[in-house]
Structures are given as structure tokens and as C-alpha cells.
Image (tube, coloured by chain):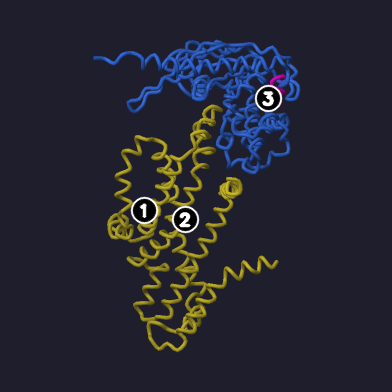
Chain colours: A yellow, B blue
Amino acid sequence: MTRVLLRLVFVFALPAVLVAVWWVASAGSTDVYWPPLRTILEAFPDVWTAERLREDVLPSVLRLTGGYALAAVVGVTAGTVIGSYRRVRAVCEPVLEFLRAVPPPVLVPVIMLFAGIGDTMKVTVIASGCMWPVLLNTVEGVRAVDPVMAETARSYGVKGTARLRHLVLRSASPQIFAGLRQALSIGIILMVISEMFAASNGLGFTIVQFQRGFAIPDMWTGILVLGLLGFLLSVVFQLVERRVLGWYHGLRASTRRSP
Amino acid sequence: MLDVRGLKKVYEGSGRRVEAVRDLTFTVDAGELVCLVGPSGCGKTTLLKCMGGLLTPTSGEVLLEGRRVSGPPPGMAFVFQEYGRSLFPWMRVGENVELPLKQKNLSKARRRELVRDALESVGLADAVGAYPWQLSGGMQQRVAIARALAYEPQVLLMDEPFAAVDAQTRADLEDLVRGLWRERGITILFVTHDIDEAVYLGERVIVLSASPTVVQEQLKVELPAERDQLHTRVDPRFAELRTHVYAQIQAAKRGEVTDSVTKSDTPPPR
């Protein structure tokens, strides 16, 4: 019981301090651009009504989910193929390095040209940015399959899809998840950016609208919502990761105990 | 049962040519327990991998029941030295044992039966639900043995399976292998660098020379079938046999030394 309490204290101590500092520092602020935290919090329930959540937050989250899922599928599939065949890797690697170096936001105007300004464009932008960390980490993970495990699988006739499912992907899963984690934060950034360019709803769109209309406290609430959304998604991600990679954390803990 | 004929394996790569195995010919009869022993680095693992179809020999062939081995045959099971890297850490013990059976298109009930039976044979019936990394090294190697048993092989190939476990666990595992062999009548080819282990376990010991490897000697182990760690190891016959094998291996090593001496003795070209 006391341990749980202690953990809660550890989790909430720093956020509480930061909020308090913000509150006190901004309390007497008359600067239009830095309204008191109090004003921002008062504006919050008025701005983020159920209707707004449905019409702005939900579309954003759906675009993010779509783009992220697409990136995960394409990244893991392509990464597995590239990681499994040395020849394919030799051909693809220079191109990959180049494409990875292009900052995804730059692609927004380009993608707009052929994907229009609708949801397709936004999902494509998110997917094209999220794909790289997933792909590159999958390549590394697939390449790093332990040779003894690979020989074990071979000698017991585990091949084809069974090999892929039970050996290659499972063995690469810690690295795939590292890629997915990086991709998640990239995805949130791209979600906002893509909605700032050409959109009629969404979180990014709303925040820019508030800013242009000089509704500064409302703009700040939007930033808070983004932060909360990011936090929520990372909690969900951690829960999934802990479930899927339970074996990996256990294995690491046991090797740490007996090196 | 198992025929190795004129096996030769040369590794070639980056301008270096290593002749790991020169010329090996021997047979293993059905139901026999044969130990292969040789000086370290003599290509034991290479030989075993060629036999298991994991490596393609440069020349010569391996026949399992008269059929040439060109890939891992379904009638062979492998137990690797590195148990920690041979079991899949993301699968529980039961799943690890069951995975090879899934490739054999057995019914679910039959698979369960085989898994339970194999784990019982190695004394780990209650570890089905554990992850391999939750078990000790000796227990992990037992799981690897159970996986091999459940596969119902005609031939079991064991590559220095106990080299990485402590001495007491090792003694237990040796008795386990002897017990399983007598109980199930499978053919076992056991590779080791430990002379005592080879003599204690084997019905026959094949001594390999230093690399490039040939068969140095084959000898029958005339010890009673009923063996135990306490009495067998103090049996005078055991001592004789191990001394003999030891002498053979020393001779094998010296053979290599004299070879290189002759080479250096040749006068340099003018």
C-alpha cells in the first residue's frame, strides 16, 4: 500500500510542481500572449465540449490511427523483406538512407499535389513519416536473429510462414517496438502539421484557427489537449508493449540477475 | 542406420581455405549410443552439422537409412550446446517442445500427449507453463532434450550438450541420456570433448584426430549396460578405457605437431 502511494507521489510530483510554477508565475500576467493559467483552465470546458471532441479530436485521432497503422504494416513488411535478403538490402540501403533524411513535413506540399487536401493527404503524410523508424528497426531486428535459433528452427523443419511467425518476427519484436515507439511521437507531430496546411477540422486546424482569431487562452487549451493526447497514447502503447514483450523484459531481468 | 562416407568439408572465404574435416568414414547402427570425441577445434561440430543436414559437405555423403541427407531430415533431432540460444525465450516450455510437432501435421491431442510425455521423461512435467529463462541451465537443457524426444527422431544428434553446465548437473544429465537411450531405444550420436563423458556414456567411442580430421580410432566400450556415476567411474576397466582414449587424443595432437615440424624442416627454396 505504502509502495503504491510512493509510486503515485513519484509519478505526480513533477507535473504538480510544474503546474504550480506555471500557475504562480502567470497569475498576474497581463500579456495577451501569456494569459494566466487560471484563465486557460477556465476556458477549457467551454472550448472542449463534446461536440468539439467529436468534430475535431476524433478526426485527428482517426487520421493518426490510419496513418500509423499503415506505416506499421508497410514498415514491418518491407523491413522483414529487406532484412531477410542480403541482395535486397544492398540495393535498398542507399535509397533508404536518402529517403529517411528528408524531413517528412517537407513532403506535405508535395503529397498535397497528388493526394489532394483531404484525409488521404493527411494519412499519407503521417504514414510516410512514421514508416522510417519502423522499417529501419525491423531491418535491424530481422538481421539480428540468433544463428543458433535459426539453426534450431531449420533442423526441426520450422520454415516458411511458421518460421516468420514464430522465429523472425518474435525475435525482432523488441526492435520493432522501439521503432513503433519513435514512430508514435513522429505521428503526433505530423498529424498536427498536416492539419495546419489545409483542413477544415482537426486539432492542428483548431489551434491555428484560435491563434488567427486571437483567442489566445483557447489556443493554449488546444496545446494542453495535444499534450494530454500524446500522454494518453504513450500510456496505451506501454500497456500493449508490456503485454507483447513481457518475455523480453523477463529475460533481460533474469540475465541481469545472473550474468 | 547412419552412414558417413568419405565426408570432407572445406570452408572457403576471404582468401582463406580451412580444411575442417578431411576424410571421415564410419557407421552408427540402429539403437546404438556412439560418442565422438576429439581434441578441441577438430571439426566435431562441423561433422555433426553435416550429418544433420545443416551444412553441405564439400565431398562425401551422409546416409540415413540408405537415403542421402541433403537437408535436415525429419527423422533427426538436434540438441545444441547453447541451450540458452536454442530455446525460444518468447515461448513457454510447452510451446517450445510443441513447435516442431506443429510442422509435422499431428493432431492437437497427439501433440499434447507427446509434449507431456517428453517433459515427464526429463522430469520437468510441471514446468510446461514456465519460460525457459525462468529455469536453471540444466533444466533448460532438459527442455531442449524433451523437445528432441517429442519430435520422435530415429537419430538424436547431440553437440556437446553438457559443456556449459556445472559438474553435478552434468552427471545428472549424463544419467538422463543413458536412461532415455535404454528406455526408448533411439540411436544417439553424442559429440563431446570430455573423455570421461565419452567413455561413461558410449557403447562405442570414435576418436577423431586433430584438424584436418580423420577417424583416429574406434573402440568398443566394454562396460556393463547398467552404469552409474559412483561405481562405473571407479571400475578399473573404465580407467583403462579412458587412459587409452586419452593417449589416443594426445597422439592425435602430437600427430599435428610432428606434421608441422617436418614442414619447417624442409630446406627453404633457393
Amino acid type shown at disc 1: Ser
> Which residue is label 2 attached to?
A181
Q: Residues within 10 Å of mark 1 (few under 14, many from 20)?
A: many
Q: Are the two marked residues, 3 and 1, in contact with CB atoms closer than 8 angstroms?
A: no
Q: Are the two marked residues, 1 and 2, in contact with CB atoms closer than 8 angstroms?
A: no
Question: In the figure, residue A202 lies in which quadrant?
Answer: bottom left
Q: CA distance from mark 3 to mark 1?
A: 56 Å
Q: CA distance from mark 1 to mark 2?
A: 15 Å
Question: In the figure, residue B104 lies in which quadrant?
Answer: top right
Q: Please check the rendered image and state whether residue B178 is part of the magenta-colored stretch, yes or no.
A: yes
Amino acid type shown at disc 3: Val
User: Residue A113's x, y, as percent?
Assistant: 27, 57
User: Residue B210's x, y, as percent?
Assistant: 49, 19
Chain label for disc 2? A
Q: Residue at x 52, y 42 (%)?
A: A170
> Which residue is label 3 attached to?
B177
Amino acid type shown at disc 2: Arg
In front of the other: label 1 or label 2?
2
* Mark closest to the chain's N terminus, 1 or 2: 1
For the residue pair B36 and A235, the one nearer the viewer reads as B36
For the residue pair B49 and A136, the one nearer the viewer reads as B49
> Which residue is label 1 attached to?
A128
User: Residue B258's x, y, as percent?
Assistant: 44, 15
What kind of element bears circle 2? helix
Q: Residue at x 58, y 42 (%)?
A: B90
**Would residue A244 be seen by someone viewing this image from the given angle?**
no
